[in-house]
Amino acid sequence: MSLEETRSSELLAVAGELSIPVDPRRIATHLGLRVAEAAFNDELSGLLVRDSEMTAIVVRESEPETRKRFTIAHELGHFVLNHPGDLFVDTLTFNRRDNRVGIAIDPLEMQANAFAAALLMPANALRSAVATLVESKNVIDRTHLIDTLARQFEVSTQALEFRLISLGFLSPA
Ligand SMILES: [Zn+2]
């Protein structure tokens, strides 16, 4: 298992966050982090900032809830994976990039994205959710599968599809 998979599943266990949808705000609180929302006027989607007193995650308040959840989980990745620095600033493009394969971005950002996906869509939970859906229907349409699972896990359909493909549960479109 990759570092992101291992650390995210350890964190879910330690935080007692074992049901779906995972609540990244509760996990942040469990780790002693503050989570706030702000009306950024530029391209910011979120940030992680730490000083000697505390560490805070701030997300863009106008974003859809699924995006906020992913951003919080992404910032948690910077924190949990001990990325060096006291300020991480993420722009609106990082989420879009995350959904494309083969685009070179900062390795730490890719790692934080992988951590966020693993935290919000744990492999075991996703595997059983797929199995349950497939068992309940004779034919599963790709779009229906992705939409249903995205609602269950409270993530964007893009993030869900990317996760299914990267786990090998779904072939690339
Ligand atoms: Zn980041």
Image (cartoon, rainbow, N blue to C red):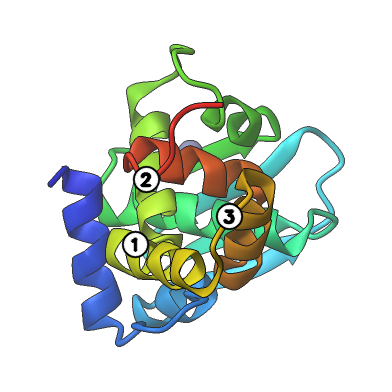
Is disc 2 in contact with disc 3, using a CB cutoff of under 8 Å?
A: no
- Image quadrant of residue 62? bottom right
Is disc 1 in contact with disc 2, using a CB cutoff of under 8 Å?
A: yes
Q: Is residue 5 above or below residue 36?
A: above
Q: CA distance from mark 1 to mark 2?
A: 8 Å
Q: Is residue 50 visible?
A: no
Quadrant where the C terminus lies?
A: top right
Amino acid carrying mark 1 in the image: Arg
From the viewer's side, name the closer residue of 20 and 92: 20
Image-based side of 69 in relation to 76, left or right: right
Q: Position of residue 22 (x, y in %)?
A: 47, 74
Q: Which residue is mark 1?
A: 127
Q: CA distance from mark 3 to mark 1?
A: 15 Å
Dot 1 or dot 2: first in sequence order is: 1
From the viewer's side, name the closer residue of 116 and 83: 116
SS of the residue under disc 2 = loop
Q: Which residue is mark 3?
A: 140
Amino acid carrying mark 2 in the image: Phe
From the viewer's side, name the closer residue of 162 and 118: 162
Dot 2 or dot 3: first in sequence order is: 3
- Residue 169 is marked as 2
Q: Is residue 44 visible?
A: yes
SS of the residue under disc 1 = helix
Answer few, some or many: residues within 10 Å of disc 2's Cα (few below 14, many 20 plus, some between 14 and 19). Answer: some
Dot 3 or dot 1: first in sequence order is: 1
Q: How many marks can you see?
A: 3
Disc 2 residue lies near ligand 1 with CB under 8 A: no
